[in-house]
Amino acid sequence: MRYIPNIITSFNLASGFLSLVFTARGDIITASWLILAAMIFDFLDGFSARLLKAYSEIGKEFDSLSDIVSFSVAPALIIYNLVSTSLTSSVSSTVSGNLQIITAIMLFFPVIMPVCAALRLAKFNLDPAQVTSFRGLPTPANALAVISIVIAANYSDSPLLNSFISSPLSLNIFTLVLSLLMVSRIPMLSLKIKNFRLKGNEGRYLLAGLVAISFLVLGMVAAPLIIPFYLMASLLSLLF
């Protein structure tokens, strides 16, 4: 029974690896769904560990190593794919040297994401204060921010979202913001619920309500709002 959480973590890692494979093939939609599957396995391995009381230092490290692949390298490669595709369609092979340098810099930005994610996870593993709350954006939230835009743009046909994912500048600013949030010390809400009382869960219920209402009103196009709502609920929960 004690190996069950690690087996589930293996599925997280496998999903992250397959996401990389599909992104390399140019299928970022399937890659995004695989990252979502990795998130589900990431939730289940922690849930099963708590349920079975099967905690271990190896499991903790294994989980973090899997998260680096699934929630930082995989979404960063999706960003790279989007930026590269956009630049390829807009920049000819005969451009000036200065423009080629700018293009190379634009393609470098996605590298920042896995570096910051690795730093964030290393600090998380060494910080006992991050048991009931987080400091900095969790890596699964980082991944969700990326795939929510890709999935929403694909299934909603929103001109705004399609314009966003085809803009290298917007994507790189987005990448930089997410990366800096991961290594920040901003208090973030943990979604682990110990009880269903309102007291102590105000931020979680606020987040659930905002997400539910936005999806009812806007449909799939509301997916990119999940992380902004999460940030809002995290900051507001400090007031409760």
Image (spheres, rainbow, N blue to C red):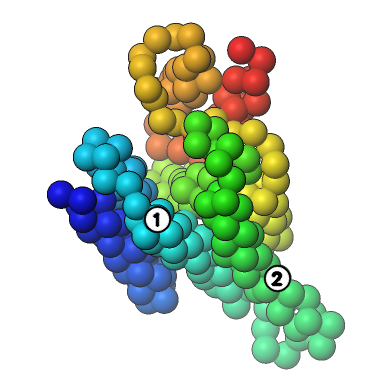
- Residue 18 x, y percent position in the rendering: 32, 68
- Residue 141 x, y percent position in the rendering: 50, 44
Q: Nearer the viewer, mark 1 or mark 2?
A: 1
Marking on residue 57? 1
In the rendered structure, the answer to whether residue 65 lies left or right of residue 101 reads left
- Residue 130 x, y percent position in the rendering: 55, 39
Say whether residue 225 is visible.
Answer: no
- Dot 2 falls on a residue whose secondary structure is helix
Marking on residue 47? none
Say whether residue 148 is visible.
Answer: yes
Q: Residue at x 63, y 49 (%)?
A: 182
How many dots with numbers?
2
Foreground residue, 129 or 179?
Answer: 129
- Residue 118 x, y percent position in the rendering: 57, 62
* Residue type highlighted by circle 1: Glu
- Residue named by callout 2: 106
